[in-house]
Image: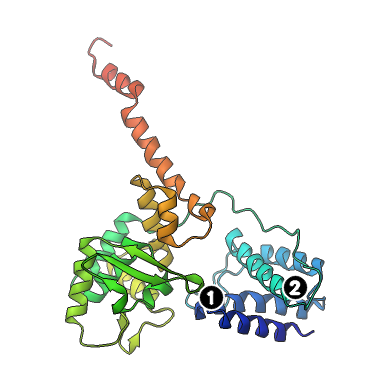
Amino acid sequence: MDLDKLIDQFLTAREAEGLADTTLDWYKRHLRAYARFVKQSGRQWNDRESVRLFLAALRSDKVRYKEHPYRKPQRKPLSRSSIRAYHRALRAFFRWLISDGVISQNPIENIKPPKLGKNLPKTIDPADFILMLDAARGKPRDEALLLFLADTGVRDEEARNLLVSDIDLVAQRARVTGKGRKQRTVYFTEVTAKAISRYLRLRSSDDPHVFLGQRGPLSVNGIYQILRRLAKKAGVTGRYNPHAFRHFFASQYVANGGDLETLRVMLGHTDIDTTRRYLHFRDEVLRRKHDSFSPISRLSDEGDNDPDS
């Protein structure tokens, strides 16, 4: 059984199920890496020890973002979340092989991915967002895009594939198509609605997509390039990639008192455990409020102001 051919068959099956191109590319990158590993090591691809050695090799890999669609490789060890992504891709692949009768035993069974630890979602700094928004003034598309990303928390692909017919500016909502071609409704504020309306009114193209580049719909890294240009103009040195805006929306939502279940639906998460990681931002707000309004803090302040103390 040739592993490369099986990977091709898996990707074809997933494409037939309606998976988006970006998701298919994600599977391809992660599975091809495993195929290269077993070829170079001379090991059997359906051997449990091969899977263990592959995941162990990833931990010692010093280069991040290999073959990433728009991020340059970096000389840094792979993060735990990156290694978990390889584990997740292999798990889906092997489960498909079993369901198709290609193999009878799952080589990744009982091999657990590394724990994520306490790393927080990496969000754009609120001050940097304001700077980028100022840099976008006078550019209707860029301003509308920034506001839409920050106001809805949609994924990069969901924003790129958004159609004019998907948007209801009066009701201030949009229908987006997420992972697995699943659709959901996201909502936005009047500020964002006005920015999108202004952009659509001023643009000359009748292309059905909302956010366009010079040659039509934005490419895979189109939004990233727009954000990078705005960040450079604004002097932003922190995070500004599309997913940082998604984290920005979610973190601000819980910090302002939003509940997790509603946030889960708005983000399109299937598992609330994925959403639960944003609770830290609410905890930080609660701690600051506690320190400000605790009776002990108030008594301490009064004591400091007492001339006889």
Mark 2 residue crowding within 10 angstroms, few (<14) / some (14–19) / many (20+): few
Q: Secondary structure at mark 2?
A: helix
Can see residue 231? no
Crowding near the residue tagged with mark 1, few <14, some 14–19, many ≥20 C-alpha atoms within 10 Å = some
Pinpoint residue 158: horizontal percent, then vertical percent. 40, 72
Residue 113: x percent and y percent?
67, 59
Instruction: Indicate how the structure is coloured in the image.
Output: rainbow
Work out how far the residue at label 2 is from the one at label 1, CA to CA, in angstroms. Answer: 21 Å
Q: Is residue 57 left or right of residue 270?
A: right
Determine which quarter of the picture holds residue 45: bottom right
Report the residue marked by disc 1.
23
Quadrant position of the N terminus in the picture: bottom right
Above or below — where is 258 with respect to 144?
above
The answer to which quarter of the image holds residue 37 is: bottom right
Q: Which mark is residue 142?
A: none
Q: Earlier in the sequence, mark 2 or mark 1?
A: 1
User: Which quarter of the rendering shows the C terminus?
Assistant: top left
x and y percentages locating residue 171 in the rendered image: 24, 65
The residue that label 2 is drawn on is 98
